[in-house]
Amino acid sequence: MPPRRLGGTPSDRLPDVLAVGSTDVGTIFVSMSARQTEGRDAEYLEWHSLDHRPEQYRIPGLRHSLRLVSTPSCRERRVASEARYDAVDHVMTYFFTDVGALGPFNELSDALPAERRPLTLPSIEYGVFNLAGKVAAPRAVTGADVIPWRPAFGIYLLVESGMASPAALVEVDGVAGAWWGEGTVVETPFPIDRRSLQITYLFLDDEPEAVAELLVSPLQRRRVRGGPTPLLAAPFHLVVPFEWERHLP
């Protein structure tokens, strides 16, 4: 059930609120994976959510993280899915202050002992993006700087070739806000080159499948009007703590 409409002036229209501060997130690290080869996705989500993911907050530059899961009903509603992304069912995202946090991020991965890693997911692609823009729907009231921390049902994820603001998509019912990033090149500690790619997170305050239906026409218009080429346009659920089997591929 979507949230009731909140009252009051949106934060992004209150200069005194904006003067207090803004997000210092500048770097987005994204890891995309396929389903667990033995069908043990729920076990993997439990381990990652209770062990690996919270350990990352030792890193001073980490501000937030999101774990997404695609279900069969989500898959049915993908508007685009290029071959390279077709098997993506899990997406893990870390929001860092800057690219310098990737060093400690890699060091922590090496430092955590092997017995703490009972399962793995088949890696498909990972990338680093510079935060390029953010916007909140006025009805959300919450400001764009903090929209990732607002409770959400899920995320509609866009990976596109080319750059263009997706801000107009927050006009769709169920989309509370959007953050997007431009792909960059990183030499260490991960050899990554995602230049020419744009990634967008649409934060949803209604069921992902329902919002996906409403986004079909706006995304088609975005493409027809000369927007970026969609490589992946798909709804995802957020992992529900201690309900690891609630949303599975």
Image: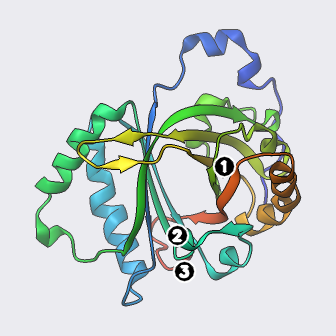
Q: Residue at x 28, y 59 (%)?
A: 52
Rate crowding at label 2 as few (under 14), some (14 to 19) or many (20 or more) other CA atoms within 10 Å: few
> Can residue 66 be seen?
yes
Which of these two is toward me, 228 or 25? Answer: 228
Q: Are marks 1 and 3 in contact (CB under 8 Å)?
A: no
| Callout 3: SS | loop
Q: Which residue is under mark 2?
A: 84
Circle 2 SS class: helix
Pointer 1 local density, CA inside 10 Å: few below 14, some 14–19, many at least 20: many
Left or right: where 15 falls relative to 127:
right
What amino acid is labelled 2 in the image?
Arg
* Res. 159 image quadrant: bottom right
Task: Point out the tag, 1 or 3, that comes first from the N-terminus.
Answer: 1
SS type, badge 1: strand
Q: Which residue occupies 16% across, 47% down?
A: 107
**Relative to 118, 42 lies left or right:** right
Residue for badge 1: 203
* Residue at image mark 3: 249
Looking at the image, residue 41 lies above or below residue 226 = below
Q: Amino acid at mark 1?
A: Phe
Q: Are marks 2 and 1 in contact (CB under 8 Å)?
A: no
Mark 2 or mark 1, earlier in chain:
2
On the rendered image, what quadrant is the N terminus found in? bottom right
